[in-house]
Image (spheres, rainbow, N blue to C red):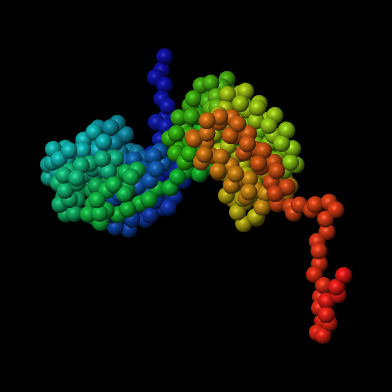
């Protein structure tokens, strides 16, 4: 049996153009290489799983490539590229600062900087999770980072830029990586499905992208798990079942009941959610996200902020026309209050039900109440010189 390779490794980008969602970084790096204005130290910052180490490896590969293309991409044919592809390059050294964070480890790295590359123009040092270095290790690294030999280039990567001392930051060109959008993650997964001959519904891929929370590596890990659980086709129902995600249909039905003031139907839907094994905090957070989406689509200027598949967008547009902004804002405030007070509630089921009951009576609170048989007493208007009449 052949060895299985996860998608995060199998489809790891080897070119700048293959990096997902970081065009602002890759375009700047390619321009610097093209103009031969490479800095001696780079710092890649951003959330986990967005391509920091991948871009560092591609950059290291390109600047040592003997025959880079017009598009500033590695040729994959020269000895430098081939040695990199087989992980046998002596000019590209990687250090994991999470497990090599002492002064002795940095002294060993500084010692290697003294020796020029045996092949190629540069000797590249990639230090991952650089924020894990100790204060003493940072101080030992300062002088080498400020004035390295002309053949040495340092590429530092971190998820927590605020933990790096300012003297290190001032010596690096800083590139901030952004979170991967749901649309970009779903588009990338669609391309993988085509290569793997796997059928997938668009809604299923969007759910995986949402669950990944901006990390493409997490999206690929979830995708592998869903592909293993499916029988050749990823469906929306199978994905929400295996990921323990609440079906969007519940939020649409409950919101319809809240808009109509039908608290009975809302409680029936909530009871079904509880019977399916979902906790109240998961439901209330999902409902808050749903109400937020309805507010977003009510303004044409913010419709693009809705990160759902095209199949669900029309449903949001239709339901948003039934609710007023004041109702949605009040319901969203009640959902937020419920979420904040949830950890302190003794009866959490009742706590969630009370939040729904309050939401279903928002219309009564927003409309003025008129008491039958009581009319507003009007004060008589007096003119100059007139005296009030006495009964």
Q: How many marks?
A: 0
- Is residue 208 visible from the viewing direction of this image? no
Q: Nearer the viewer, residue 133 or 81?
A: 133
Quarter of the image that includes the N terminus:
top left
Q: Position of residue 28 (x, y in %)?
A: 38, 54
Examine the rendered structure and indicate whether residue 315 appears above or below residue 370: above
The residue sitting at 52% across, 34% down in the picture is 345
Seen as rendered, the residue at the extreme right is 391
- Is residue 304 visible from the viewing direction of this image? yes
Q: Nearer the viewer, residue 263 or 146?
A: 263
Q: Position of residue 248 (x, y in %)?
A: 63, 35
**Quarter of the view holding residue 356:** top right
Examine the rendered structure and indicate whether residue 126 appears above or below residue 346: below
Relative to residue 387, is residue 247 drawn left or right?
Answer: left
Seen as rendered, the residue at the extreme top is 1
Relative to residue 3, is residue 135 drawn left or right?
Answer: left
Relative to residue 127, is residue 181 drawn left or right?
Answer: right
Examine the rendered structure and indicate whether residue 290 appears above or below residue 242: below
Q: Nearer the viewer, residue 165 or 328?
A: 328
The residue sitting at 33% across, 55% down in the picture is 32
**Quarter of the view holding residue 118:** top left
Seen as rendered, the residue at the extreme bottom is 385
Q: Position of residue 105 (x, y in %)?
A: 16, 37
The residue sitting at 73% across, 47% down in the picture is 364
The residue sitting at 66% across, 42% down in the picture is 359
Q: Position of residue 113 (x, y in %)?
A: 15, 44
């Amino acid at each position: 049996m052949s060895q299985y390779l996860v998608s995060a490794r199998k489809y790891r980008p080897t070119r700048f153009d293959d990096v997902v969602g970081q065009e602002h970084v890759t375009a700047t790096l390619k321009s610097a290489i093209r103009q031969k204005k490479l800095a001696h130290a780079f710092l890649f910052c951003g959330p986990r799983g967005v391509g920091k180490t991948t871009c560092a490896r591609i950059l290291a590969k390109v600047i040592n490539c003997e025959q880079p293309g017009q598009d500033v991409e590695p040729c994959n044919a020269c000895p430098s590229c081939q040695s990199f592809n087989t992980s046998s390059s002596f000019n590209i050294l990687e250090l994991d600062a999470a497990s090599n964070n002492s002064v002795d480890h940095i002294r060993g790295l500084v010692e290697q900087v003294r020796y020029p590359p045996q092949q190629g123009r540069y000797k590249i040092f990639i230090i991952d999770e650089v924020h894990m270095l100790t204060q003493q290790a940072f101080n030992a690294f300062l002088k080498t980072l400020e004035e390295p030999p002309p053949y040495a280039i340092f590429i530092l990567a971190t998820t927590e830029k605020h933990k790096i001392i300012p003297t290190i930051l001032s010596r690096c060109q800083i590139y901030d990586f952004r979170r991967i959008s749901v649309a970009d993650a779903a588009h990338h997964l669609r391309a993988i499905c085509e290569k793997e001959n796997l059928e997938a519904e668009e809604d299923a891929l969007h759910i995986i992208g949402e669950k990944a929370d901006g990390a493409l590596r997490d999206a690929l890990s979830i995708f592998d798990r869903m592909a293993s659980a499916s029988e050749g086709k990823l469906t929306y129902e199978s994905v929400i079942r295996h990921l323990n995600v609440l079906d969007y249909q519940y939020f649409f039905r409950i919101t319809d009941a809240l808009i109509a003031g039908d608290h009975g139907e809302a409680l029936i839907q909530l009871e079904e959610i509880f019977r399916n094994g979902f906790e109240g905090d998961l439901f209330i957070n999902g409902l808050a996200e749903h109400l937020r989406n309805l507010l977003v689509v009510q303004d044409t200027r913010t419709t693009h902020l809705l990160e759902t598949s095209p199949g669900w967008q029309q449903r949001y547009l239709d339901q948003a026309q039934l609710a007023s902004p004041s109702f949605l804002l009040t319901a969203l405030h009640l959902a937020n209050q419920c979420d904040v007070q949830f950890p302190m509630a003794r009866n959490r089921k009742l706590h969630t039900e009370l939040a729904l009951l309050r939401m279903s009576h928002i219309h009564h609170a927003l409309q003025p109440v008129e008491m039958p048989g009581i009319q507003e007493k009007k004060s008589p208007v007096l003119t100059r010189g007139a005296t009030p009449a006495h009964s």
